[in-house]
Image: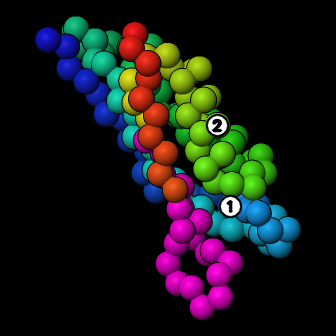
């Protein structure tokens, strides 16, 4: 029975102008991203990058998405998932968590965020 890999990138940090308010765009904010990707393992040992998910390419996709202004971090998470599925059709499941580290809420400490899960259709 084939196994499954879970590939994770955790604690990715980006500075971007995501948010509903014009001030969020102008001032920007820090974001932290965690990505978890499930994919089937090959029958034999991994001997080529094409047999797995390249975490460098995953990072670049996320980095590029954070250069594009989004009003909602939910949209950002969904677009990252879209691009990852296109690049890596072997993905079975993606979980993306995005946290805004300095939300513009008076007297608020902590972070706000969203976690998006996408499970691939049967293959």
- Pointer 1 local density, CA inside 10 Å: few below 14, some 14–19, many at least 20: some
Which disc, if any, is residue 85?
Answer: none
Reading the image, the residue beneath label 1 is: 15
The residue positioned farthest toward the left in the image shown: 1
Reading the image, the residue beneath label 2 is: 79
Instruction: Give the camera-side residue of 113 and 3.
Output: 113
Q: Is residue 57 visible?
A: no
Can residue 40 be found in the magenta stretch? Answer: no
Residue shown at 23%/14% (left/top)? 45
Q: Is residue 40 above or below residue 113?
A: above
Q: Secondary structure at mark 2?
A: helix
- Pointer 2 local density, CA inside 10 Å: few below 14, some 14–19, many at least 20: some
Q: Is residue 46 above or below residue 12?
A: above
Pick whichever of labels 2 and 1 is earlier in the sequence: 1
Residue shown at 47%/27% (left/top)? 54
Between the C-alphas of marks 2 and 1, the distance is 18 Å
Residue shown at 66%/45% (left/top)? 75
The image shows residue 66 at horizontal and vertical percentages of 69, 48
**In the rendered view of the protein, which quadrant contains the C terminus?**
top left
Residue shown at 54%/24% (left/top)? 85
Give, as a single range, the part of the protein colored magenta: 95-113
* For residue 33, side relative to residue 6 (left or right): right
């Amino acid at each position: 029975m084939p196994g499954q890999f879970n590939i994770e990138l955790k604690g990715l940090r980006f500075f971007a102008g995501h948010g509903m308010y014009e001030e969020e765009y102008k001032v920007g904010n820090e974001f932290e991203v965690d990505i978890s990707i499930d994919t089937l393992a090959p029958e034999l040992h991994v001997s080529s990058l094409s047999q797995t998910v390249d975490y460098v390419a995953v990072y670049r996709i996320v980095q590029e998405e954070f250069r594009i202004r989004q009003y909602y971090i939910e949209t950002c998470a969904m677009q990252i998932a879209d691009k990852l599925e296109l690049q890596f059709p072997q993905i079975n499941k993606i979980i993306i968590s995005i946290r805004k580290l300095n939300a513009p809420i008076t007297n608020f400490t902590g972070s706000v965020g969203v976690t998006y899960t996408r499970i691939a259709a049967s293959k």
